[in-house]
Image (cartoon, rainbow, N blue to C red):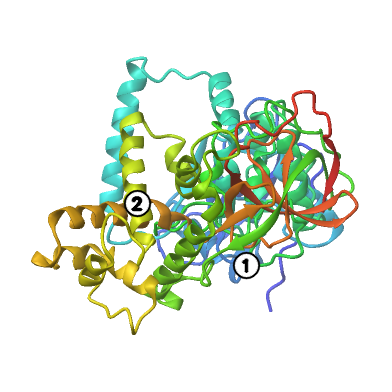
Amino acid sequence: MAQAYAHEPLPSSRSIRLISLAPSVTPNAPIRCDITIVELQSQRAKVPYEALSYVWGSPTGTIPIRCKGMELLVTPNCYDALRRLRSRFSRRTLWIDAICIDQGDDDRAIRERNSQVQMMGDIYENAARVLIWLGPAHKFTPAVFRLLSMIGFIASWSWRHNFAQFSEKLIVKTLSRRFQVWIRAMANLQCSVPQDKVYGLYSIFRAAGLELPDVDYKKTVQEVYGDTAKSFIRMRSRKLNVLLISIKPRGYDELPSWTPNWEMSQMLGPDVVDITGNFHLESDRYRASGYSLATIPNFTPARELQVRGLIVGTVQKIIVSSTAGEQPELVGKRNFSVNYVIACRAWLMQLGSIWEADMYQGQEVPANAMINTLAFFKMSEAESLELEQTEAQFRSWADVFAYPDCNVVTAQDIEAVAQLDPSSVDYSEIIEAALNHANIRSSGDTVSDAVKQILVSAGIFHFVICFQLANWAFLFLETGHIGRAYYNCREGDKVALLAGSNVPFVVREVGRDRYQLVAPAYIHGIMYGESWPVDENGVKDMTLV
């Protein structure tokens, strides 16, 4: 059995290892290399090298290569890259993290890994060239590289003609402004070690002004994620935007309720239905807590986050689809759709006293509150002409969902288009079928064109706009406010305004001034600072756990 290669200790905190990849004229010949140690200076390293960036894939090495005559295991992706990068007649000097950094689990290896990861920005910056290995080619590779070549030509031409002269300071400033994009994108990073969702971007974050604690692979995932969240809050803007992605409807109980859920995608999926519970609330338009600043959090205790806030209401009633949070493909797409129709209709029926009131919360006509509650993400950014169109679609939708007590169209019209017998199916199935564009189109002369237009308008409002929030619950507060939040809310939960947050949060009380964060919320009538005291009278210290 071949002797296993063991990494020699690095002599200084600025030392790095480089591999010298032996050449081969035979593609399938065994991979052979040597490892040398060099000092990384503020200028270029004395030995020019190329730094490789690639996806690890497997977390541990499984394929042997020969390093200084001894056996070193590398991952399949690393092995493929080495074979492709190996020259035929000359040695090639490379820096590859999985080989050049000791991946052992003893204390010395972990200390080295902590130090080397913090240096990775310098390592890549000092390289003569950075290589990106995407994996073996496939049938689409030539087309992709043709496209990249075109993009490269355009970028090069723009650069030469002074259209893209960006200074380093400008790049850093741009990065810092787009932290919310980074916050979301981190969940989609494919990392063999979960902590690397943070540590893999460590140098970029530090360059952009984010003061992260030192890299420490001995810390648990929840400690690393929690430290990162607190670092985002501690930035100059002192905002709680990072808390938007803390929703954990599927568990992840090992993480505190306020810690970002980077184990679940925070991007909108391919379907229209929102699966994040927060994406539509990421808007600078909202100022629920005025222009207040968040408390600067301490890094200890690790599982707690100190905030200042104000409880503004209690969730008295919740209406939510019975299949909210389920995958439509598993429960049946029509079943998923019908159940949301049931929830929407129940919400509309529950609005009785609000419908009948002259004003909603003394601010506006009730219809405005209803349409905004259904489509706040659409209404907050729509132009005036689009607003009028959406309001007209809402009126059609509300009339259809009042079935069989419609006012504009008749129950008979809806049943004729749905082609369902009301004595044998639920009202919601009839409504869902009547909004189906194919059914409307095939209804022929059984209903008038005016009725068809109303149904088409209602269908657009429901399936194109409302359906995006099919996983969200309808909330009724004891204060008379109505709103929306993700399906994991419960009756009895509180609604809190937190200093530094643009939107309210649903929280769950677990002790005196101690709360679990449940979900961000849209509560109509308090989204623009209406309930936040200018003098912050009544705002108190709260602990999120």
- 10 Å neighbourhood of mark 2: few (<14), some, or many (≥20)? many
Residue carrying label 1: 61
Q: In which quarter of the image is residue 399?
A: bottom left
- Residue 100 location (% of width, % of height): 67, 51
Q: Please identify the quarter of the rendering in which residue 120 is found.
A: top right
Three-letter code for the amino acid on which mark 2 is drawn: Phe
- Report which residue position mark 2 lands on: 461
Task: Name, please, the residue furthest toward the top.
Answer: 162
Report x, y in % for residue 449. 13, 55
Dot placed on the residue nearer the N-terminal end, 1 or 2: 1
Q: Which of 370 and 258 is in front in this view?
A: 370
Closer mark to the observer between disc 1 and disc 2: 2
Looking at the image, residue 22 lies above or below residue 447: above
Q: What element carries label 2?
A: helix
Q: Is residue 129 left or right of residue 307?
A: left
Is residue 260 among what the camera can see? yes
524 sits to left or right of 239: left
